[in-house]
Image (tube, rainbow, N blue to C red):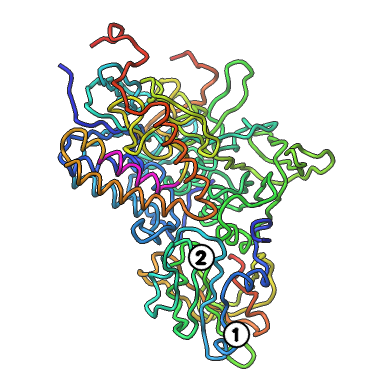
Amino acid sequence: MCMRVEDHVILDIRKTADLVEITVDGRVISAYAGEPILAALLNAGIKVNRYTVKRHEPRGLFCGIGQCTDCAMVVDGQTNVRTCITPVKAGMIIKTQDGLSKEE
Amino acid sequence: MSIINNGFLEYDELSAIQMLPSDERYAKGPVAVIECVQEIPCNPCEMACRFDAIKIGEPITNLPMLQEEKCSGCGICVSQCSGLAIFIVNKVYTDKTATVAFPYEYFPIPKVDQNVEAVNRKGEVICRGKIVKVMNPASFDHTPVVTVEIPKEFADEVRSMKRG
Amino acid sequence: MLQERDLVVVGAGPAGLAASIEAAKAGASVLLVDLNLKAGGQLFKQIHKFFGSSAHHSGVRGFDIGKMLLKEADDAGVETWLGSAVIGLFPGMKVAIEKGTDGSEKEVITLKAKKIIVATGASENVIRFKGWTTPGVMGAGAAQTMINVNHVKPGKKVVMLGTGNVGLIVSYQLMQAGCEVVALVEAASKIGGYAVHAAKIKRAGIPIYMKHTIVEVKAGTDHCTNRVVIAEVDEKFQPIAGTEKEIDADTVTIAAGLKPSAELPKLMKCAFTFNGVFGGMIPLHNENMETSVEGIYVAGDSTGVEEANTALEEGKIAGIAAAEALGYLDVEKAAVIKKEIWERLEALRMGPFGEARMAQKEKILEEYMEKIGTPVAEEGMVEDSDVNN
C-alpha cells in the first residue's frame, strides 16, 4: 500500500532524504530517514500504534504533534516513544505497544 | 444568506450584494466577476490589478468593487484572490459559446483541448466544456487559472470543472 | 553557575518567531525553544494563501511566510533549540529545558532568563461520540500535518466534523493531497468559517450536512474506522432518533475549535481569566503583552485563539516590550512602534468575523487594568528551596 502524496499542485514533494528500511512487528517497510516514524507507518497502511492498559483498546494517530501520546510505540526496545515526533533511523525495530509493554 | 447556511451562493444573492458587470460590458469581451460577499480584512485583489479595476480602499474589510470599464479580463486577479472567489467570464467568445476562467489548485491540472464536465457553484455537473487555456506561470504562485468553453446559456453558472 | 539569556521565547510559531526577531534586532540575547523538530508552528501546514493586507503578507502562502520568518530569525542572530521542551518555569526566572527525542538520552538544562515570552499556541478540541478513540479518528490539525508536512495521507475517505475555517481549509487541502472527502458535518445551522472557503468545498461537489453530528464510528476487523454514523440534531444539538445515516469512510477529522495552551504562565502564578470567544482559560495581559507577573509576556494563540496574522503582531509587541524593558530600545521609539502595531491589529480584527475578538481583547486589557494595574515580580508555585540549582 502506498499512501504517500505523489503529486501536488502547490507542494514540492520531491524527496531528498534517503530511503531506508525499518521493521514493524516483524514486517520490513520502507521509510525516509528523518521523517516521523508515524508517517512511514501510515504509508504502509499501519494505523494501530498501541493497545490500552486496562481495556486493551487500539489507539492510533490523534493529535500528530506529540501532545496526546496515542501514537506511542516500542522503538528499539524503548517504550512510550511518540512516533509522530520521533524521526526514522535506518534499521529501527518498532513494535505495537501493548499497555505499558514492560519488557526487553 | 444561502452561502452561510449551505455553502453555496445563489445567483440572485450574489447580484444583490456585488457589482456584477453590466450587459453592455459583457458584450465587449472577457470581464472579472467578483464573488466575494463577506467583509473580511483582505485586499490582495486590489493590489494585483494593474489596471486599477478593483477598488477596496479603507478599511480593507470593504467588499471589492469592480470598475468594469477599466477591466481588461486579463485574469491575474483570479490567481491572486486568496479566497479563489474571482472568475473571468467572456459571454461573446463565439456566438454560441462563452468562456469561464476559474482558479484550479488540484492535480492533475487539465490540458488545452481536454473535454471536461463543467460544474456550478453547488458542484453539480450542468454541461460539458472544452479547456481552451491554462495559465500557470510562476507569478501565479501555484494557482493555475483554467479557461473552459461552454454553451453560452451557462455562463452565469459554471464556476469550475469536475476533478479528474 | 547557570547560563543566562536576556530573553527566552517558548514556542517557535509565528508569535515566538516575530518576538525573537524584534528582540534580537534590538540587541538582546535571545534563546528560542520549541518541542518540534522544525520551527514555524502551524505556519508550515498552511499551504493556502493568507488573507489580510499587504502589510500582513496577504496572498502569500503560510509556509512561505514561515520560511521568511526563519530566515529573518537566523539573520537577526536568534539562537534556536529545536526538539527541546520547556518543562518548567521556576522562581528566579529559571527555565528548565528537556532536550532530545523520545527513546534517546534526554538532558535537562536549567538556565536563567531576564525576560520570558510564552508563545505556546493552542491545542485541538475533541467531540466525543461512540467510537471516538478508534484509530482513524483524529484532529483536523493532525491530518493537516500528515498531508502538508509529511506528505502522507492519513486515510482514503474522510468525514470532516466542523465547518469553521480549520474544517473548511483542511477539507480543501485533503482533496489537494488526493484524499476523498466524503462529507462535512456541522451541528449548527450556519457555516462557521468564511463563505469563500465553503464555496470551494461546494464547487468540488462535497455534501455538507448542516444540523448534523457524528453519533458513532464503527471499526472493521482491523480495529480501524470503516463506517461513520451521522444524525440530525435539534436546537439543543441533541441527536434526533431515526435520522441516522451511515457513511463509508476510514478517517474522521475533528475540527471543533482550539483551546489556548498556557500551562507555563500558570506555573508562575500569572493571573488568568475565562474567555469563551478565545477558547478557554487565558492569561491576562496588558498592552505590552506582559502578564500579571513582571518579566513574563505572552503572545499568539496562547492568549486567545485567533489567526497567524494576529499572532505575528502580538509577538512583535511582546518582543519590542521585552527589549524595551531590558533597556535595548528607547522608550519613546518603542511607544511609536507599539502603537502602529496595535493599529494593525485593530484592522485585522475588523468585520463580522473579527469584531467579537476585538471586543474581547479590549475586555482583557480592561480587566488587567482593573485587577492588576502594574505587573509584580514573580512568586512561582515552587519554593526556592525546592529547586535544585
Give the farthest residue toward the front: C370
Residue at 43% from the left image edge and 54% from the top image edge: C47
Q: Which residues are magenta?
A: C307-320
Q: Main secondary structure of the magenta part?
A: helix
Left or right side of C273 for B50 = left
Q: Secondary structure at mark 2?
A: loop
Count of numbered badges drawn on the protein: 2
Who comes first in sequence, dot 2 or dot 1? 2
Q: Which residue is mark 1?
A: B98
Q: Position of residue C308 (x, y in %)?
A: 41, 47
Whole-Å distance between the Cαs marked 2 and 1?
20 Å
| Near-viewer residue (C349 or C256) | C349
| Near-viewer residue (C355 or C191) | C355
Label 2: few (<14), some or many (≥20) within 10 Å? many
Left or right side of B147 for B3 = right
Is disc 1 on the same chain as disc 2? yes
Q: Which residue is mark 2?
A: B84
Res. C120 image quadrant: top left
Check residue C312 for magenta coloring: yes
Left or right side of C1 for C320 = right
In this view, A19 is above or below B91: above
Label 1: few (<14), some or many (≥20) within 10 Å? many
Which numbered dot is residue B158?
A: none
Parent chain of label 2: B
Q: Position of residue B113 (x, y in %)?
A: 54, 81
Residue at 62% from the left image edge and 24% from the top image edge: A57
Parent chain of label 1: B
| Near-viewer residue (C40 or A64) | C40
Work out whether residue A2 can be spotted: no
* Nearer the camera: disc 2 or disc 1: 2
